[in-house]
Image: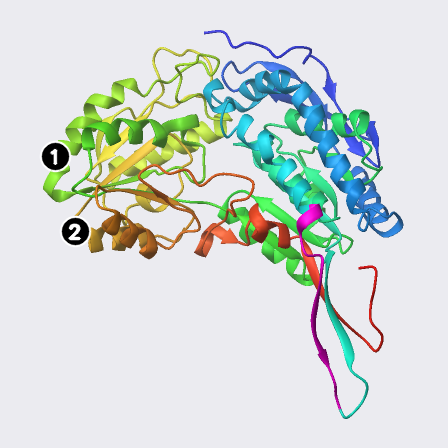
Amino acid sequence: MTGSKPESQDHEERLLIDGRLTAAKSGATFNNINPATEEVMGVVADASAEDMDRAIAAARKAFDKTDWATNHAFRKKCLEQLHTAINEEKELLRAELVAEVGAPITLTYGPQLDWPLSDGLLWPAQQIETYPWNRRISDQTLGGGKPTCRWVWKEPIGVIAAVIPWNFPFEITINKIGPALATGNTMIIKAATQTPWNATRIGRLIAEKTEIPPGVVNVVTTQDHKVSNMLFTDSRVDMVSFTGSTATGRLLLEAAAPTFKRTLLELGGKSANILLDDCMFEKILPMSAAVSCMHAGQGCALPTRLLLPRSRYETGVAILNDAWKYVSCGDPNDINTIAGPLVTAMQRDRVLDFIEKGKAEGARLLKGGGRPKHLSRGWYVEPTLFVDVDNMSTIAQEEIFGPVLSVIPFDDDDDAIRIANQNKYGLSGMVWSASTERALNVARKIRTGSFMINGGNFYGAEAPYGGYRQSGNGRQCGIEGFEQHLETKVVGSEFPLTGL
């Protein structure tokens, strides 16, 4: 297998700080490695504490000293310019995502690229014109004095640090940029170390193709966790928008607590896919097998627990066993590939360790479980199917983030709901049924931030996304996500306020 190389990528990608594309002050770089081939594609600037300090200072200055926070029409224009600029390089970006993320190319026509690009910037831009930034509430008279005119104002928070994961980096970056800038904030984007180029491309387009003022958006790449942690502890940063693991989210909360930063956390998941006994197993189970291993299982909302009714359990397992041969693993440039590589060798080994725990704890390994024999290079794990899984076992409780599906039996609808909720996470899930009433009953009782009924897709820039419990707090996208980036001020005045 040979992975294709994106056009013009044997070079050094630079930081964006205060409107300038720049190398790290020290000149340090780190490699960007193709996970399908293990080849070094190029390098990216490795920022130091001094570089991060400059980025934070630039964002703070741009918020405090320019009219970015109040110039609504200009913000809308800039977001539209960025949307156009990215579209002009969309095919280069597509190849880049396949190469550095290891994402199967089919996913770039959906959530990896095309879906977020379609409305991730334009929907928030449209809200600038229609959102009620100021609203009048009833006049108040106290102690026989003059009536007081009262207003509620919505204002940007200030400087937002956006910390990006490696699994869907462009999608998450766009869905953080859109509402943060539309609401008048400035930003520091900390790109994922494993997949930095999509963020540095956006940084270059901002500098070269838009009128976004210097310092409004800064893009920083670094291998140093201490440099990244500056975003959590620096008092000049007002909010952290983080997508990543629950363990890292917990550390972020601890670091941010002394400065009382607002935090938006989209964390881990262990979603349940529930097939009720009246649905079409022959049609649904092959799709369920493919979805669970999509992008090598590297998706926080992927349904990696499959719940089957005991009354049809053996039939369901037999269908899965037969369908598993179609869950293809290989070159992400191949249009037929479902599971590409894991993002790093460390992540591959972590997934293999989970598989060993599954076997040790008594789950029955039906398919996969090792490294693919037909792939001599790349950080791959075979699509792996466990059946007869105890819901309290490690592989059913922990987020593996690999191509591993755990099949769990249930007795009736209430038992399925109990099992689905018997987990520390609460990000997503799905149910399949021929009965609208039964499906809705399950959907209402599952404690997750998003849910799919019979394959219905909830995704989109106007759809608020986030989780319950240890899957995070706050919402990204939608009006709820838009308002996540705003402060509320109530104003009373003895004279009417005009021109708002």
**Quarter of the image where the N terminus is located:** top left
Mark with earlier residue (2, 1): 1
**Quarter of the image where the C terminus is located:** bottom right
Q: Which residue is identified by label 1?
A: 314
Q: Position of residue 273 (x, y in %)?
A: 30, 41
Look at the image and tell me whether residue 367 can be seen. yes
Membership of 48 in magenta stretch: no
Crowd rating for badge 1 (residues with CA inside 10 Å; few <14, some 14–19, many 20+):
few
The part of the chain drawn in magenta is 128-142
Dot 2 amino acid type: Asp
Membership of 138 in magenta stretch: yes
- The numbered dot on residue 412 is 2
Q: Residue 489 lies in what quarter of the image? A: bottom right
- Name the residue: 58% across, 19% down: 94
Q: Position of residue 86 (x, y in %)?
A: 68, 25
Name the one closer to the observer, 132 or 98.
132
